[in-house]
Image (cartoon, rainbow, N blue to C red):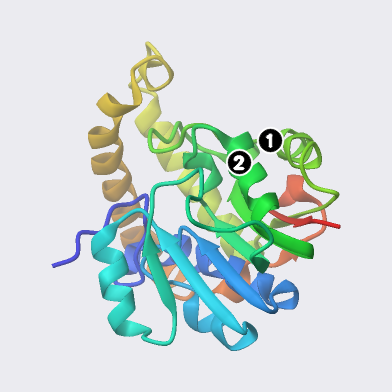
Amino acid sequence: MATYTTEIASDKLISDNPIHQRLLKAYFAAQPWVSGSLLEIGCGEGRGVETLLPLADSYLGIDKIGEVIQSLKQSFPEVEFKQAVIPPFEGIADQSFDTIVSFQVIEHIENDQLFLQEIYRMLKPGGKAIISTPNNTHTLSRNPWHVREYLPQELIDLSTSIFDRVEAKGIGGNEKVWAYHEANRKSVQKIMRFDVLDLQHKLPAWILKMPYEILNRMNRNKLHKQQGDSVTRISHEDYPLVDKPALGLDLFYILWKK
């Protein structure tokens, strides 16, 4: 039986719907740039495989969780999946892919520079990578599952030090989405008022993971109970792609190799 954490977000849990739809949006937003041989880094449970598969000549999905990979192989026999802990990407040759996508992954990677360097190495000339990650401007509390989160310019600076061209965009929200985000912010602030010693920023991440998971799940259930249909009716279409990354809940960057 699958166990869904708030960090992964599930399409099976109603209270997770706003986050699931926000993550799903990245796949729809990426469609105009996807072509040829495709690599997805951090494919998870295959949230976006059906969205991108028709646009690709070949599709390789990589994830660190072996059980997930075995399940995906059964669900999508026409797609190649591999279990791997990255970076580096061992066994993948230089200039192997036309397109690489990696959504909500780089914030988990200790060596983010090597991660992007490896993506550049694996891209064919003229290839492009599409990445997304939370915009730290709008983060409500420390996420102990993340090594770091980026402000828009921080990720631009890192990306331009490696790639030949960077298109910096964001995944924003309409009024419905921002109303949910504001309710979430107020709810989180009520919880954080008890952290008078600012332990969320002082304690090691491993100590914070369990209380973060419990409180986050309680908070999402509370928001669903309070807002009802406004939670369940949010779809990926409520998250527009915006040209100014600072306006995005998530950063959404297209990274080009000459």
The residue at which mark 1 appears reads as 151
Q: Which mark is residue 89?
A: none
- x 55%, y 83%: residue: 53
Q: Is residue 5 left or right of residue 156?
A: left
Residue 39 showing in the rendered view: yes
Q: From the viewer's perspective, is residue 251 above or below residue 227?
A: above
**Observer-nearest residue: 220 or 61?**
61
Q: Secondary structure at mark 2?
A: helix
Name which residue lies at 34% across and 65% down.
Answer: 10
- The local secondary structure at tag 1 comes to loop
- Point out the image quarter for the C terminus: bottom right
Q: Tell me if 222 is positioned left or right of 179 in this view.
A: left
Contact flag, marks 2 and 1 (Cβ < 8 Å) = no
Q: x and y percent of residue 226 in the render?
A: 36, 59
Viewer-closest of 71 and 3: 71
Query: Mark 1, residues whose alpha carbon is within 10 Å: few (<14), some, or many (≥20)?
Result: some
Q: Position of residue 192 (x, y in %)?
A: 39, 27
Q: Residue at x 23, y 42 (%)?
A: 214
Q: Which residue is mark 2?
A: 138
* 246 w.r.t. 12: above or below: above
Left-right relation of 119 to 86: right
Q: Residue at x 34, y 26 (%)?
A: 205
Q: Quadrant of residue 80?
A: bottom left
Query: x, y (%) of residue 21?
Result: 50, 68
- What amino acid is found at the position of numbered circle 1 in the picture? Leu
User: 213 and 161: which one is in front?
Assistant: 161
Q: Quadrant of the N terminus?
A: bottom left
Instruction: Residue at the far top: name it.
Output: 197
- Image coordinates of residue 59 in percent, x first then y, are 53, 76
Q: How many marks?
A: 2
Residue 13 visible, this angle: no
User: Label 2 is placed on what type of residue?
Assistant: His
